[in-house]
């Protein structure tokens, strides 16, 4: 009787390795004035002593709007922030260039100051700054947006991160064409972040900007009664709302949108669509800002349904 020797092969689908949890720091609107510099240095020391921090995102306004905008002062603020021992990503705030036209700040041409800020805070193309610069993509790699070195993007543990230059104007732009170009660049970069996340099957998106698109948050019916215009889109950011709604609805997975500007620490869900329906997968984080010299530890757990969670870090 013949004996047959067979090999039974079991084909198992390759399972993706679970993404590792990690943390990073968010700061912004600091330090304002020399009086806060020493406390900001303690903040830096605290971040540096927190082992799990992968990088620091500064949400802009590295100084107060009325403070000196000279080359010396901007370089001083850059050097101060280079004391972070991990990679540092900075998105510009209005105080960093736009408000430099104020008399108290030196009555500079704001666009010339923006160019200088770019030279100092983004010295090496394709890299962040900080104690351990990391590689990232910059919008300046694209011919149509070659000056926008500040708009950066990177991916880590199945999460897409993007820093986007968005500031809110409180008065008409001195050069409307510059504003249009800046807004177009920001819209294209946000769209690119969502496109990349969808192509790669990313588990979340983190967007960092300076401007606060929502003047007031809370129950919408109450907010309308207290301040009718406060729930309306900021006129100079009107382009941003439909973009965030469309992209967030299409992406479906968790999105955290971090901003500074209005000096209120909060974590909320302020994005509603045209039918007044909450966009549930969109969460806003506004970090600690002057006069509070503190920071936020963002824990990222890619394999959890919520992905992002926030831990307050207070500095003595």
Image (cartoon, rainbow, N blue to C red):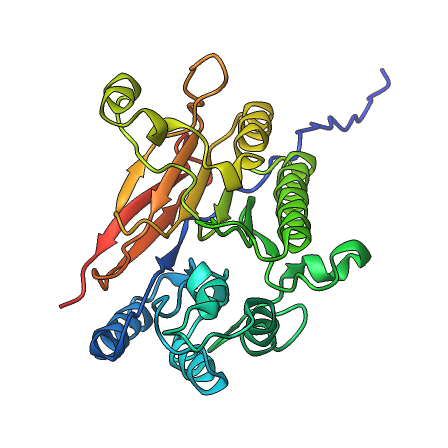
Q: Residue furthest top?
A: 275
Q: What residue is at 30 percent from the left and 45 percent from the top?
A: 310
Which part of the image, by quadrant, shows the N terminus?
top right
Task: Answer with left or right where residue 310 lies relative to residue 155.
Answer: left
Image quadrant where residue 80 sits: bottom left
Q: x, y (%) of residue 11? A: 71, 28
Q: Residue furthest right?
A: 2
Closer-to-camera residue (215/37): 215
Q: What residue is at 58 percent from the left and 28 percent from the top?
A: 251
Q: x, y (%) of residue 234? A: 45, 37
Kindly tell me whether residue 178 is visible in this rendering.
Answer: yes
Q: What residue is at 79 percent from the left and 25 percent from the top?
A: 6
Using the image, determine if residue 249 lies above or below residue 309: above
Using the image, determine if residue 256 lies above or below residue 185: above
Which part of the image, by quadrant, shows the C terminus?
bottom left
Q: What residue is at 36 percent from the left and 70 percent from the top?
A: 63
Kindly tell me whether residue 203 is visible in this rendering.
Answer: no
Closer-to-camera residue (16/143): 143
Closer-to-camera residue (218/175): 175
Q: How many marks?
A: 0
Task: Answer with left or right where residue 299 lies relative to residue 198.
Answer: left
Q: Residue furthest left?
A: 316
Using the image, determine if residue 303 lies above or below residue 178: above
Q: x, y (%) of residue 307? A: 42, 38
Task: Answer with left or right where residue 149 lies relative to residue 29.
Answer: right
Q: x, y (%) of residue 105? A: 40, 74
């Amino acid at each position: 009787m013949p004996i047959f020797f067979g090999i039974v092969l079991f084909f198992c689908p390759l399972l993706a390795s679970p993404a590792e949890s990690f943390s990073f720091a968010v700061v912004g609107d600091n330090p304002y004035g020399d009086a806060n510099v020493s406390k900001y240095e303690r903040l830096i020391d605290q971040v540096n002593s927190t082992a799990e921090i992968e990088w620091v995102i500064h949400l802009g306004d590295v100084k107060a709007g009325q403070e000196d905008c000279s080359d010396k002062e901007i370089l001083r603020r850059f050097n101060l922030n280079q004391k972070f021992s991990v990679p540092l990503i900075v998105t510009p705030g209005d105080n960093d260039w736009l408000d430099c036209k104020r008399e108290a700040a030196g009555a500079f041409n704001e666009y010339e100051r923006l160019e200088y800020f770019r030279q100092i805070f983004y010295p090496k193309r394709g890299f962040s700054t900080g104690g351990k610069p990391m590689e990232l993509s910059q919008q300046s790699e694209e011919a149509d947006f070659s000056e926008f070195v500040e708009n950066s993007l990177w991916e880590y543990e199945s999460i897409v991160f993007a820093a986007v230059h968005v500031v809110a104007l409180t008065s008409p732009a001195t050069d409307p064409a510059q504003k249009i170009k800046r807004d177009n660049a920001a819209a294209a970069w946000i769209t690119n972040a969502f496109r990349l996340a969808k192509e790669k099957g990313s588990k979340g998106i983190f967007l960092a900007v300076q401007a606060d698109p929502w003047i007031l948050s809370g129950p919408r019916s109450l907010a309308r009664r207290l301040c009718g215009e406060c729930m309306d889109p900021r006129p100079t950011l009107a382009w941003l709302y439909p973009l965030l709604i469309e992209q967030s609805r299409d992406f479906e997975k968790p999105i955290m949108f971090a901003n500074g500007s209005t000096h209120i620490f909060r974590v909320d869900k302020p994005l509603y669509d045209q039918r007044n329906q909450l966009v549930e997968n969109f969460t806003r984080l506004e970090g600690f800002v002057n006069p509070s010299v503190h920071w936020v530890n963002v824990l990222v757990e890619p394999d959890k349904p919520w992905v992002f969670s926030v831990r307050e870090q207070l500095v003595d």
